[in-house]
Image (cartoon, rainbow, N blue to C red):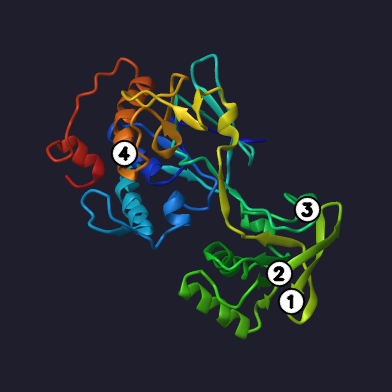
Amino acid sequence: MSDVIETDVVIIGAGPVGLFAVFELGLLDVKCHLIDILDRAGGQCAELYPEKPIYDIPGFPMVTGQGLVDNLMQQIAPFGPQFHFSRIVNTLEKQADGRFKLTTDVDETFYCKAVVIAAGGGSFQPKRPPVEGIEAYEGKSVFYAVRKMEDFRDQDVVIVGGGDSALDWTLSLEPIARSLTLVHRRPEFKAAPASVNKMQELVAAGRINFLTGQVARLEGEDGQLSVVHLSMASGEATVHATRMLPFFGLTMKLGPVADWGLELNDNLITVDTEKFESSVPGIFAIGDINHYPGKLKLILSGFHEAALMAQAAKAIVSPGERVVFQYTTSSTKLQKKLGVA
């Protein structure tokens, strides 16, 4: 049976704008669940440029992508948002009772009163390695994300890649895998130095294997992997494997959003500039995924959009309730919510 979750608002996308939406909604006592295809919060800031400096966030002469995400996570902590990582929303439908029903690719069902799409330029989709016939193994023994670590327990795991995701999962799965081999096309890595050092210590201790090369072909039956063939400088090598995790980076695609009946403008969701509501009442779009006259694709613009969206979403979640606009600097009520009163 699928998991069924009920909440006030579902936010699709846990990048900076989606995270700040939690704050603005939280001030209005609106509860949120967030869904993201990545395995962590932060969107592009965390995945593509965690150490890149950002200079146009108000109040921060300079902050890194990861630093901004860390601060936002601290800011929204008092509101207890619930995160659902490593999944994608497949369907979005309005129900007879006015609520929305969303389903994900991990057999979850969400019911909510309003939906906020904060998915940047769309959903991140993993790049498929140029390996002939890999499609037959996808979802059975070749995976592009770790949904449940237990699926890799006592398995012979091959991880391919040299970035943070490849190194992070190498370190996380080593304790439970029967065997683990990391494959990268060169001995240098783009991952955090601390992770690289830990990986090299595990190699030296004989707890994992590291091979320099590329995946040439896969062997197995009925989608179940048995052998990974590698192309190396010294020739071809084979590795026994029952699971493979290729981390070849991500591409941006609009994904299932295109099938939800929303008015689009060049693959962006058309919204108004009063509530940042889409053509479907109750579905909002904020951040880089929306379109309106004069739109600027800036994080700070997304923050402004989140604030106005929250006021409109509150009216849907709590119809008839009088909302008095308050400032966090002077409202004791708001400061109590934030835990600073």
The amino acid beneath tag 4 is Ser
The amino acid beneath tag 3 is Tyr
Dot 1: few (<14), some (14–19), or many (≥20) neighbours within 10 Å? some
Residue closest to the eye, 79 or 201: 201
Residue at the extreme right of the image, as rendered: 221
- Badge 3 element: loop
Residue at left 64%, top 54%? 144
Using the numbered discs, state the Cα–Cα distance from disc 4 to disc 2 in whole angstroms: 42 Å
Using the numbered discs, state the Cα–Cα distance from disc 1 to disc 3 in whole angstroms: 23 Å
Q: Would you place residue 211 above or below residue 270 in this image?
A: below
Task: Please tell me how many numbered marks the rendered image carries.
Answer: 4
Using the numbered discs, state the Cα–Cα distance from disc 3 to disc 2 in whole angstroms: 18 Å
- Nearest to the eye among marks 3 and 4: give it: 4
Q: Quadrant of the N terminus?
A: top right
- Badge 4 element: helix
Using the numbered discs, state the Cα–Cα distance from disc 1 to disc 2 in whole angstroms: 7 Å
Q: Which residue has dot 3 on it?
A: 137
Q: Which residue has dot 4 on it?
A: 301
Question: Disc 3 or 4, which lies upstream in sequence?
Answer: 3
